[in-house]
Amino acid sequence: MTAGELAVVLAAVLCCIGFAALIVVLVRVLDTLKSLRAEVTSLRSETGPLLIELRASTEAANSTMVEARDDLDRFDRVLGSAEAISGALAGSARLARAALSTPVIKTAALATGTARAVRRLRGRQHQTKRLETKRLERKRSA
């Protein structure tokens, strides 16, 4: 065998070894892909119901948020009405105080003055009665 033939045989053997190694690597890659495919299928079967539940929870949360936003809008309107009513009542209270305070004070003063006058008059009548009683007693005893 000549050196050229030996080189061709050696090249053929090396190519066969290379192809064998390539086949082994490709078989391992194929096994890994099959395993990966099985894991992906398992993952999909496990996450499918979870995704459905997540969608339902998200929809429920969105509807709750919309209701809360509506309730907040209603509360804002009620609060605005309450503030308007409070302002109106405060103005009415000031007006009533201004309109009624002077007559009420004058009426209270009149009632107090009248009560004092009545007490003084009663006190004088009692004194007069006492004096008359004492005079009558003196006349009788004399």
Image: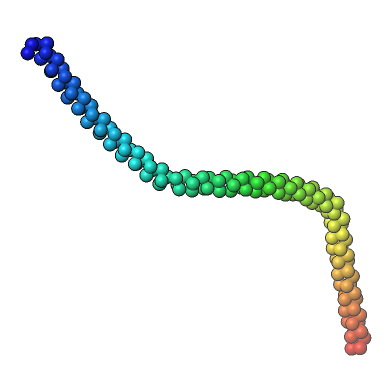
- Tell me if residue 15 comes above or below residue 34 in the rendering: above
Question: Does residue 57 appear anywhere in the picture?
Answer: yes
Compared to 32, does 60 lie above or below? below
Q: How many marks?
A: 0
Nearer to us in this view, 46 or 97: 46
In the image: residue 133, left or right of residue 70: right
Choose between 131 and 142: the one closer to the eye: 131
Q: Relative to 135, does residue 119 appear above or below in the rendering?
A: above
Q: Is residue 100 left or right of residue 67?
A: right
Q: Residue at x 59, y 47 (%)?
A: 63
| Residue 70 picture location, percent across and down | 65, 46
The N terminus is located in which quarter? top left
User: Could you tell me if residue 120 is visible in this image?
Assistant: no
Residue placed at 67% from the left, 45% from the top? 73
Residue displayed at 91% across by 88% down = 140
Q: From the viewer's perspective, tell me whether residue 108 is left or right of residue 42.
A: right
Place residue 113 in its image quadrant: bottom right
Seen from the viewer's position, the closer of residues 99 and 84 is 84
Quick check: 35 above or below 5?
below
| Outermost residue to the left | 1
Asked where in the image residue 10 lies, by quadrant, the reply is top left
Residue 86, given in percent of the width and then of the height, sits at: 74, 49
In the picture as drawn, the residue positioned furthest to the front comes out as 1
Q: Nearer the viewer, residue 46 or 11?
A: 11
Left or right: where 121 falls relative to 42: right
What coloring was used for the rendering?
Answer: rainbow
Indicate the quadrant containing the C terminus: top left, top right, bottom left or bottom right: bottom right
Tell which residue pokes out farthest to the bottom in this image: 141
Q: Residue at 89% x, 85% y: name it.
A: 137
Query: Measured from the top left, where is residue 117 in percent x and y?
Result: 88, 66
